Image: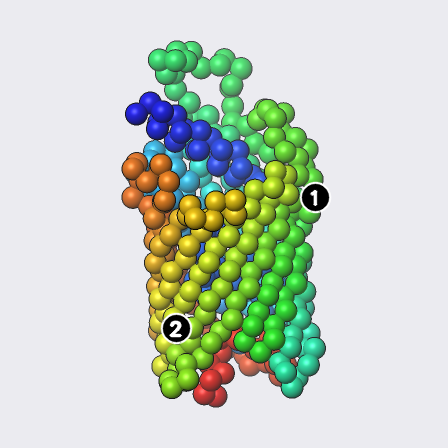
């Protein structure tokens, strides 16, 4: 029992230290909101798109990660898009807040074969804080360190860059996030000063042969941290059914694993979403597949949103792959 509890504590400590390296990516991007992981998706589509996301990880474990985020992106002129995202993340006694401003420019490589290239750039402002308000004496540490007299906080600025290639119904995006190194935090102790991490996302949209209002979407998401070489992969599958009035619903499943432990998944779980009259709702559940599973009921995520201010573009490069191309 003590061994399991120690494992949990060490796991929570690991994620707390890694928290500032990069905001965790779960399945938010699969809620028809790829802008979560790449600025290159900003402005693809005819609407101002707003999404609010709430995520609670490891329900049942005290101090487990909890996150809220807001995303918005829209097109400007015919070939460009801008976006903004903000988040609030809590993990034990650490707090992180941030805001990101993004710009994307979309190019048409070939009209006939529907090949498009998008380039994106984001400027990030992050604030990381150690919250001491909950520090209390324990049997092992009966006296709290008297040198800890206030909250410890640090801010940093950084940049992300990426590209998105689309060929008909195939897409591939690649991002380099947090290009700048940071000053090592003096009150944390030893920690990497490189925040750089790489993300790749690719997939293909398959139309139903008999029913053109049905789509299947297999996809893969890969992430690697440059500081220590950690990497993980998501394998996803979605089924989407449209109606004639632009409403739709979808269901799917996601499987995440560390790349050196392919047959030992970190998380696996179902998800579903619906769009009705431009209002969007999605729910995702992830079951933890490791020793922590005995102490929590999984990770729950909810996404709500709205699309409005429709303004059709004259350029095909800003037309989303999911804009019901099957029957228009």
User: Nearest the camera: 98 or 233?
Assistant: 233
Give the x, y percent position of residue 245: 38, 83
Residue appearing at x 59%, y 47% in the figure: 224
Element on which disc 2 rests: strand
Label placed on residue 318: none
Residue 89 appears in the figure = yes
Element on which disc 1 rests: loop
In the figure, residue 319 lies in which quadrant? Answer: bottom right
Residue appearing at x 35%, y 36% in the figure: 291
In primary-sequence order, the first of circles 2 and 1 is 1
Q: Nearer the viewer, mark 2 or mark 1?
A: 2
Does residue 130 appear left or right of residue 300 in this picture? right
Residue on which the image places disc 1:
180
Q: Are marks 2 and 1 in contact (CB under 8 Å)?
A: no
Label placed on residue 240: 2
Does residue 87 appear left or right of residue 79 in this picture? left
Neighbour tally class for label 2: few under 14, some 14-19, many 20 plus, Cα within 10 Å: many
Give the x, y percent position of residue 31: 43, 62
Indicate how the structure is coloured in the image: rainbow
Give the x, y percent position of residue 114: 62, 80
Query: Which quarter of the rendering shows the N terminus?
Result: top left
Distance from disc 2 to disc 1, alpha carbons, whole Å, reads 39 Å
Neighbour tally class for label 1: few under 14, some 14-19, many 20 plus, Cα within 10 Å: some
Residue appearing at x 38%, y 52% in the figure: 268
Q: Image height check: is 223 above or below 12?
A: below
Give the x, y percent position of residue 244: 37, 85
Residue appearing at x 61%, y 26% in the figure: 190
Q: Image height check: is 274 above or below 155?
A: below
Does residue 38 appear left or right of residue 183 in this picture? left
Residue 23 appears in the figure = no
């Amino acid at each position: 029992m003590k061994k399991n509890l120690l494992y949990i504590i060490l796991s929570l400590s690991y994620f707390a230290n890694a928290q500032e390296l990069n905001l965790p990516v779960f399945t938010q991007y699969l809620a028809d909101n790829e802008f979560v992981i790449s600025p290159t998706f900003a402005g693809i589509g005819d609407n101002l798109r707003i999404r609010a996301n709430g995520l609670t990880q490891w329900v049942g474990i005290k101090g487990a990660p909890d996150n809220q985020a807001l995303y918005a992106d829209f097109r400007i002129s015919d070939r460009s898009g801008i976006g903004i995202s903000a988040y609030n993340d809590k993990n034990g006694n650490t707090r992180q807040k941030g805001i990101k401003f993004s710009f994307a420019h979309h190019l048409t490589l070939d009209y006939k074969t529907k090949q498009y290239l998008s380039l994106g750039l984001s400027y990030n402002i992050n604030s990381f804080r150690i919250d001491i308000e909950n520090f209390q004496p324990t049997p092992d540490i009966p006296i709290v360190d008297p040198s800890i007299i206030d909250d410890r906080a640090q801010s940093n600025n950084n940049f992300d860059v990426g590209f998105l290639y689309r060929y008909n119904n195939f897409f591939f995006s690649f991002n380099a996030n947090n290009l700048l190194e940071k000053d090592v935090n003096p009150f944390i102790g030893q920690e990497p000063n490189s925040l750089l991490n790489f993300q790749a996302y690719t997939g293909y949209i398959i139309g139903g042969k008999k029913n053109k209002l049905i789509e299947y979407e297999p996809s893969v998401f890969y992430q690697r941290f440059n500081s220590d070489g950690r990497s993980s992969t998501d394998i996803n599958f979605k089924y989407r059914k449209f109606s004639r009035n632009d409403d739709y619903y979808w269901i799917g499943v996601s499987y995440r694993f560390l790349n050196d432990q392919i047959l030992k998944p970190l998380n696996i779980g179902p998800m579903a979403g619906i769009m009705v009259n431009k209002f969007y709702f999605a729910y995702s559940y992830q079951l933890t597949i490791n020793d922590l599973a005995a102490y929590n009921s999984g990770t729950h995520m909810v996404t709500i949103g709205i699309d409005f201010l429709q303004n059709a573009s004259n350029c095909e490069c800003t037309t989303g792959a999911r804009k019901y191309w099957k029957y228009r």
